[in-house]
Amino acid sequence: MAQLISFVIPCYRSEKTIRAVVDEAAAAVDALSDYEYEIVLVNDGSPDDTFSVIRSLCEADTRIKGINLSKNFGQHAALMAGFRHVKGDIVVCLDDDGQTPANEVGKLIAGIQEGADVVYARYEHKQHSWFRNFGSKLNELMTRVMLGKPKELYISSYFAARRFVIDEVARYENAYPYVIGLVLRATKNIINVNVTHREREVGTSGYTLGKLINLWVNGFTSFSVKPLRIATMIGAFCAIMGFCYGIYTIIKKFINPSVPMGFSSLMSAVVFIGGMQMLILGLIGEYIGRIYVCMNNSPQYVIKETINEA
């Protein structure tokens, strides 16, 4: 019996690219033996005609499903919406801009068949802008330090996972989903395979600086308390340094009573300690704010319309 591969593709401003991505994914699975496919396209509140293109694709092929979110909830929320509408034994996630090569999905599937639970694509030469590459490096560092990602594991938006992993990820119902953290929480049996990375032919990346910052904050506050522990260590360090500086000042005064106490050094210490206190309070406030939002049952996403949903 043929296994079903479910593609989940978040779509944003992709009216000019999504059709080619869908055609390439379908052709790639047709070239594999003993596999069938379905494609779930999640329109993440695109301001252009992306959903109109999705509708036409769904009308032409019942194996393609369309999900229209009521507004832009972000890539990870769109993925969560897709995960709850898949039926496949293996779930493959990729981008809507054509930079992730759908025609190389066989490499990811082979990794699954060899025993891995999750297979991430690794790019030897990324064709992103320097801004996106810099953001990816910071995100990689954050996931390694805060979420315990193995140093040798490369994380990307193009990956394949067994159904049980996706089911476990989909159980997360709180606001601020972070798929990478949920995958790392579900399994450690994760590998990489090398694939090519294409240059963007149409449009620009939807990730702005603000969105990248939100993604990083979401990642380390949703699945780790390490930032709070780091804040505690910083506070302890500042207290020790302040105590040592006080001892130094007293000793210096006894040795040379004519030495002035130093207004500048005092103000520097006050500003430094005050800044650290505000930083730590802001971090604590971020955690408390997220708890408040989750207690109010803020939705991960709101579905406005679905197409070809059984």
Image (cartoon, rainbow, N blue to C red):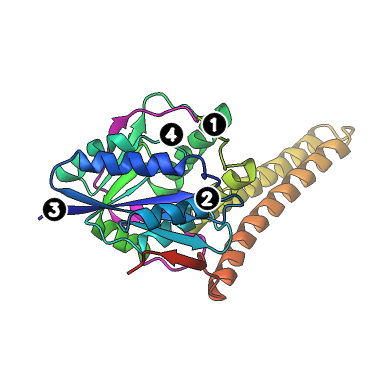
Q: Which residue is mark 3?
A: 2
Which residue is at a point 87% across and 32% down the rendered structure image? 259
For marks 4 and 1 on the same chain, the one whose residue lies earlier in the sequence? 4
Could you tell me how far apart the alpha carbons at marks 2 and 3 are, in whole angstroms?
A: 31 Å
For marks 4 and 3 on the same chain, the one whose residue lies earlier in the sequence? 3
Which residue is at a point 30% across and 63% down the rendered structure image? 167
Task: Look at discs 2 and 3 and give the one toward the viewer.
Answer: 2
Horizontal and vertical percent position of residue 195: 32, 30
Q: Which residue is mark 4?
A: 99
Horizontal and vertical percent position of residue 37: 25, 51
Q: Amino acid at mark 4?
A: Gln
185 or 86, which is in the foreground? 86
Quadrant of the snapshot with the N terminus: bottom left
Could you tell me how far apart the alpha carbons at marks 4 and 3 are, in whole angstroms?
A: 28 Å
Q: Amino acid at mark 1?
A: Phe
For marks 2 and 3 on the same chain, the one whose residue lies earlier in the sequence? 3
Q: Amino acid at mark 3?
A: Ala
Identify the disc placed on residue 70: none
Could you tell me how far apart the alpha carbons at marks 4 and 1 are, in whole angstroms?
A: 17 Å
* Residue 165 seen by the camera: yes
Residue extending farthest left: 1
Callout 3 secondary element = loop
Q: Which residue is mark 1?
A: 134
Confirm whether the magenta stretch covers residue 192.
yes
Could you tell me how far apart the alpha carbons at marks 2 and 1 are, in whole angstroms?
A: 28 Å
Whether residue 151 sits left or right of residue 259 in the image: it is left
Pointers 2 and 4 in contact (C-beta within 8 Å): no
Residue extending farthest top: 125
Q: Which residue is mark 2?
A: 50
